[in-house]
Image: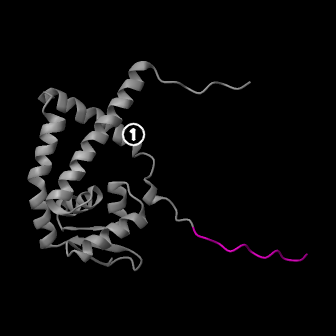
Amino acid sequence: MTSSPPSLDATQLGAYFALIEASSLLKHTVEQQLQDAGGLSYVQFQLLASLGDSPTGSRRMTDLADGVVYSRSGLTYQAQTLEKRGLVTRTQASDDERGVTVTITQEGRAVLAAVFPGHIAVLDDLLFAPLTRTDIETLADILGRARDHMRRTPPRSAGPRRRKRAAAPEQAP
């Protein structure tokens, strides 16, 4: 006997669709502002902001990938793009010859400083304007709990790498 899959009630479905739509609308406007103000993609902004928030201005690539929930290869491409613009440097990690450390440059900090005022204005206008302070605190609590629950499963950047293997020839008995 097969069981039917679980279903969502109207309130759960409404919450889900509202979250996805609000997130998409906000991200679209944020991406446009970041591109206009600093020539940055959303992921590039996340990388720079994460580095700028670090006390040393540096983080390991794997930690960055986990934080922004992005693939290793995709993050490597984004870091290369930022490095070509002089916004970050990439060096071999001191404690792991396979690891890479990314560090924000002064030029990277200048780009962050240029995009932040418009970024904050977009967030204030689109996300926070219709909410009370209590609403914002409740939203932060709810989304924080949902995020923490989702983060209990390791991010894809922490998963094992897939390696292409040539088929082993069969041995005769």
Quarter the N terminus occupies: top right
Q: Which residues are magenta?
A: 163-173
Q: Quadrant of residue 23?
A: top left
Label count reads 1
Q: Quadrant of residue 13?
A: top left
Q: Is residue 81 or residue 7 the one in the foreground?
A: 81
Q: Amino acid at mark 1?
A: His
Q: Which residue is situated farthest in the right direction here?
A: 173
Tell me: 75 left or right of 29: right
Give the percent coordinates (x, y) of residue 76: 37, 69
- The correct choice, above or below, for 101 with respect to 152 in the image is below
Q: Which residue is mark 1?
A: 149
- The correct choice, above or below, for 163 with respect to 10 in the image is below
Chief SS of the magenta region: loop
Give me the residue at 10% from left, 45% from top: 121
Tell me: 11 left or right of 33: right
Give the percent coordinates (x, y) of residue 57: 19, 67
Local packing at callout 1 (Cα closer than 10 Å; few below 14, some 14-19, many 20+) is few
Give me the residue at 12% from left, 30% from top: 133
Q: Secondary structure at mark 1?
A: helix
